[in-house]
Amino acid sequence: MTSYGRTRVTLHFVTLQDQLEDAKPTVFSVNGRSIGLIKSRGKIYAVRNVCPHKGAPVCEGTLRGTMLPSDPGAFVFGLENQILQCPWHGWEFDLETGSGVCESRGHLVLYPVVLKEHSVYLDL
């Protein structure tokens, strides 16, 4: 348990940073919750391992990019290794925001990650 000013934060140790592979979700049980840690684009993301669509284990999906808004006739691919695609129905979610790539697709639950001395902690 750590205190920051008046706010009390409970940090849960999950793993060491070097135990995570780039662009490959790794699932852990943290305080009774299935949470995927994803190291990508110089950052570590923590995602509740539940797709908002049908409850699929979303962290068993693929990390990829997606098509970006572009001019008519132009196809622009981007956000490489920032989009998590659900293994059941292919729904795509942005790791930065948890938002579905298509607005009506719901949101992933994201958790704050704290890095201290090569260790990964989550604030649940």
Image: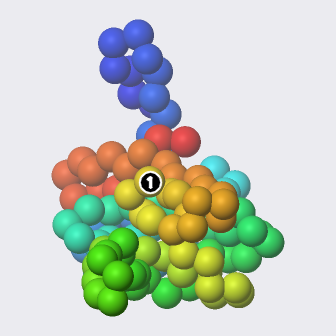
The N terminus, quarter of image: top left
Q: Is residue 10 above or below residue 106?
A: above
Identity of the amino acid at label 1?
Answer: Thr
97 displayed left or right of 28: left
115 displayed left or right of 56: left
In percent of width and height, residue 105 lies at: 65, 64
Q: Is residue 35 above or below residue 82?
A: above
Classify mark 1: helix, strand or loop: loop
Which corner quadrant of the image does residue 87 belong to? bottom right
Of all residues, the one furthest to the front in this rendering is: 72
Q: Is residue 5 above or below residue 63?
A: above
Q: Nearer the viewer, residue 117 or 60?
A: 60
Q: Nearer the viewer, residue 120 or 52?
A: 52
Q: Residue at x 75, y 68 (%)?
A: 53
Q: Residue at x 58, y 60 (%)?
A: 103
Of all residues, the one furthest to the right in this rendering is: 54
Asked whether residue 118 appears in the rendered view, the answer is: yes
Q: Residue at x 22, y 59 (%)?
A: 118
In percent of width and height, residue 60 lies at: 58, 84
The residue beneath circle 1 is: 97
Q: Residue at x 38, y 50 (%)?
A: 113
Q: Nearer the viewer, residue 53 or 31?
A: 53
